[in-house]
Amino acid sequence: MPPARTLPGVLAAGETLVLDGGLSNHLRAQGCDLSDALWSARLLADAPQQIEAAHAAYVRAGAQVLITASYQATFEGFERRGIGRGRAAELMAGSVELARRAAGRSGREVWVAASVGPYGAMLADGSEYRGRYGLTVRELERFHRPRIEALAEAAPDALALETVPDTDEAEAMLGAVRGSGVPVWLSYTVAGERTRAGQPLADAFALAAGEDQVVAVGVNCCDPADADRAVEVAAAVTGKPVVVYPNSGEVWDAAARGWTGQGTFDPARVGDWRRAGARLVGGCCRVGPSGISGLAAAPASSGP
């Protein structure tokens, strides 16, 4: 069952909640093969117990909000694997149920946000880090709406419109969620003070400023250093609570298919993020349960 308090109500009260970390990296740590184009969404059909176990690991680490394994779950992607629309909708709804089960065993308040990844995630070619797919806003909205409806039907506490690379897609996703009745957060992937497609962050965040359904706005799947400034801009432009969950700071080498560099994710950053307006804080790629434990233990990670 969902917690008694709503996620918007908690954020409005000024509390800071800890999100989970990278689901895919912990699934790999559990021995899962994510080489398929469906990535972690494949496990919704083939090994749902692995997803539930990964969620449970983050709950034990102190996560108060779990993000579902639906980032790469699309009707088009499932169809390529021979999975029809009815079964695909069941799997998307199942992603919410798996997170609910892991949350329910914790004995404390844990909210569930259903992940809605960008169009580029369905392509499985890294284009979510470029954006500008050659589609119109209307075409992107038509793509997103059916999966958003399927996820909303499962009654998550929020929809996480995440890793959004440009303002066209943000506009499309905001259009697709209208009427769903589910609170949403909008989170861009950024480089410096611009979206991955090159738009100024102030312009990107402004799209959500007048949207009452949007309960938080911010960034994810970016360098921790880029997140610092983005939190300030998101709060100043929108006046809304900010969501921030960057990567570890390592860099993906597509040719070598491996991570390079040193991790720079520091849980101590949560204090600065919170003072700048962040109310949902966590990690993305390569940030595991230990990183989330550090956030949960940080002095500014909870309370008004």
Image (cartoon, rainbow, N blue to C red):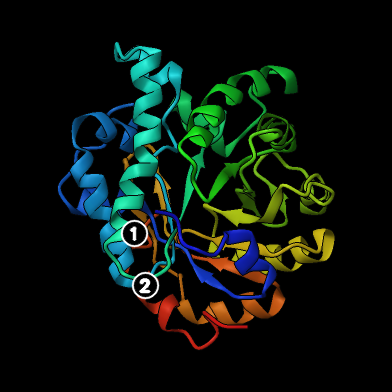
Q: Residue at x 36, y 39 (%)?
A: 95
Q: CA distance from mark 2 to mark 1?
A: 11 Å
Question: Which residue is located at x 75 percent, y 34 percent?
Answer: 171
Q: Which residue is mark 2?
A: 62
* Dot 2 or dot 1, earlier in sequence: 2
Determine whether, in the image, residue 168 is placed left or right of residue 130: right
Viewer-side residue, 168 vs 144: 144
Q: Amino acid at mark 1?
A: Ala
Residue 124, percent across and down?
43, 28
| Mark 1: secondary structure | helix
Which residue of the protein is positioned furthest toward the bottom in this rendering? Answer: 299
Q: Return the x and y of residue 21 as percentages of the image width and height.
A: 40, 60
Q: Would residue 203 be found to the left or right of residue 270 on screen?
A: right
Is 261 or 74 nearer to us in this picture? 74
Query: Which residue is under mark 1?
Result: 103
Q: Say if residue 108 shows up in the picture.
A: yes
Q: Is 1 on the left or on the right of 114, as rendered? A: left
Q: For label 1, count other residues whose C-alpha is less than 10 Å away and answer few (under 14), some (14-19) or many (20+).
A: many
Instruction: Kindly check if marks 2 and 1 are in contact, taking CB atoms under 8 A apart as contact.
Output: no
Q: Quadrant of residue 37?
A: top left
